[in-house]
Amino acid sequence: MPELPEVETVVRELNKKISGRKLKQVEIFDKKIKQLRLPLPMKILSADRHGKYIVLHSTKGKILLHLRMSGRLKFAEKVQEAPEKYERARFYFNRGFALQFLDQRRFGTIEWTKGLPKMGLNPLNKEFSAENFRELVRSRSRGIKTLIMDQKLIGGMGNIYADESLWFAKINPLRKSDSLSDKEILRLRQSIIRVLHAAIKKGGSTMRDYKKTGGESGSYQLFRKVYKREGLPCFRCGKKIVKIKSGGRGTHFCPVCQK
DNA sequence: AAACTGACCTGTCGGC
DNA sequence: TGCCGACAGGTCAGTT
């Protein structure tokens, strides 16, 4: 569920809510998640985003969270003892604060580590330069949508924002990456940056499970152009948006203005 | 090395 | 109504 804008939104909230707080105890409710063996208590210094990972930095190491499809974090000033529905783990901080990890589909992960997984370019950072992106796109031959969603190449792009970015760039998601012109590559880069920033501004997209740490929904879904709009008119040319499958994922685009 | 496929889970929705 | 398959924001291991 959560892609870069959703994770970024959550991380910004965590920074406000738990930076500097003392983590006192962790409870794991789902036995699919293995015990962390943290040196508790520990002080959480800050929260960070690494692709779609959430990183909690402490003086002794990092707690790495991944929400996968249906995971979410909920911050509570006071929690009841019993886990709520779909609650898989809980972090207890000083003064009664708790962070709940909810995950209906149980794909989400939590680990205690020193290092970080290898990750592609951060599209919000200057490393996502026109030159770096062009090099990346040109150096292989595969569908452009699956390329921009490959976390080893670009960290954080997911299904919604890949479709949205390709619509803004007027590029068909099935185009082979090495067939894109310089102009198209520049347009795609700009579209990715524009879409991600706009989505962060709206607190991400709530299609179904995703919620911010206080329980509010994001609102970027109200501004989407193609994702889950199959059969509806394209906002640019009026023709119907179609849905196909690419890399096993639902893929939405305008067959007329995305060349 | 790079690019597909199915598997991992639980729930929902649409068709017959 | 009920059943059954397809599908959902993401990755991974296994296979070509």
Image (spheres, coloured by chain):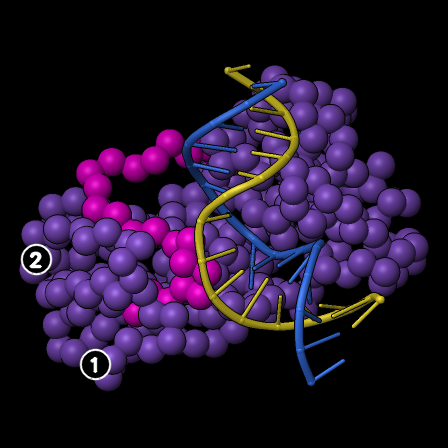
Chain colours: A purple, B yellow, C blue
Q: Residues within 10 Å of mark 1 (few under 14, many from 20)?
A: few
Q: Residues within 10 Å of mark 2 (few under 14, many from 20)?
A: few
Q: Which residue is mark 1?
A: A81
Element assignment for label 2: loop
Name the spot of residue A160 as percent of width and height, x first. 63, 53
**Relative side of A54 to A22, left or right:** right
Residue at (29% x, 48% y) in the render: A64
Residue at (61% x, 49% y) in the render: A159
**Relative side of A153 to A175, left or right:** left
Residue at (18% x, 51% y) in the render: A36
Residue numbers of the magenta segment: A100-121
Front one among A4 and A236: A4
Is residue A234 visible in the rendered image? The answer is no
**Relative side of A149 to C13, left or right:** right
Name the spot of residue A6 as percent of width and height, x first. 48, 59
* Callout 2 and callout 1 share a chain: yes
Using the numbered discs, state the Cα–Cα distance from disc 2 to disc 1 in whole angstroms.
20 Å
Residue at (21% x, 81% y) in the render: A81
> Which tag is nearer the camera, tag 2 or tag 1?
1
Where residue A74 sits, quadrant-wise, is bottom left
Element assignment for label 1: loop
Q: Which residue is mark 2?
A: A40
Residue type highlighted by circle 2 = Leu
**Relative side of A80 to A152, left or right:** left
Front one among A27 and A132: A27
